[in-house]
Amino acid sequence: MQKRIAKTIILLTLDFLSAQLGYLEEGEASYYAPSFHGRRTASGEKYDRHALTAAHRTLPFGTYVRVTEKSTGRSVVVRINDRGPFKPTRIIDLSEEAAKELGILARGIGQVRVEVTRLPDETPAPSPPQTEFYDTEGHPIKPYPYGVQVGAFSESANAYVVAKNAWKEIREKVFIWRANAKGKPLYRVIIGSFRQRREAEKLRNKLKSEGWQAFVVHLPL
């Protein structure tokens, strides 16, 4: 039990430190395969192989990091907009353009140093109210019973980023559902507010066709 608690504390500390300006991390980098171009990222944006972006396991969406290839000294600044890598031996997944800048396209991987250079540009998310449902400005709302969930996050700031990205693209009502999971807050991003389930199912099908991980939820009103 003590070892498990200690491990949890270490992981939480790493998550906190990784969001600080100047945080350094070293390890292996890889990059997205060409087939990922146009697919939806965890932040709600679509992956663009020509953009300078990357996936990281814990850094907030919108964080900028400088990635330096240790053997050559070549570096590139990328914006975090996705989650990954899924291989435990790697610390960051780069876009194809970023990998090209680093000179690791042929090898596929590289030993790199990752440094946080700029925190998210987004206006800090308002403190989540205790009410279960609120809009992207932090105002409590009363939705109808059915909506479509497109993401769930332990940090409210990441939920706000996804909600705003979704609204910019879809122009549908978007709000946050503050729920609890194992005694901790969980912030779910919900699109749409409907009286009938079939209306929500129609939106779900549309969102899934556009690459969202979407499913209908019945809200506990």
Image (spheres, rainbow, N blue to C red):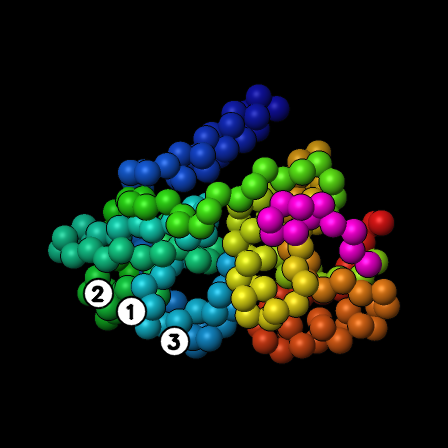
- Give the residue type that dot 2 points to: Glu
The mark tally for this picture is 3
Q: Confirm or deny contact between disc 1 and disc 3 (CB under 8 A).
A: no
Say which element carries label 3: helix
Quote the CA–CA distance across marks 3 and 2. 16 Å
Residue beneath disc 2: 101
Which residue corresponds to the image point at 14% horizontal and 53% vertical from the top-left? 73
Point out residue 26 in the picture as x, y percentages from the top left corner: 29, 44
Which of 65 and 27 lies nearest the eye of the viewer? 65
Say which element carries label 2: helix
Point out residue 85 in the picture as x, y percentages from the top left corner: 43, 56
Numbered circle sitting on residue 97: 1
For the record, the magenta segment spans: 134-144
* Residue 201 appears left or right of 105: right
Which residue corresponds to the image point at 18% horizontal and 50% vertical from the top-left? 70
Q: Give the main secondary structure of the magenta stretch.
A: loop
* Residue 84 appears left or right of 115: right
Which residue corresponds to the image point at 39% horizontal and 39% vertical from the top-left? 18
In reply to whether residue 142 is colored magenta, the answer given is yes
Rate crowding at label 2 as few (under 14), some (14 to 19) or many (20 or more) other CA atoms within 10 Å: some
Numbered circle sitting on residue 34: 3
Point out residue 153 in the picture as x, y percentages from the top left corner: 59, 48
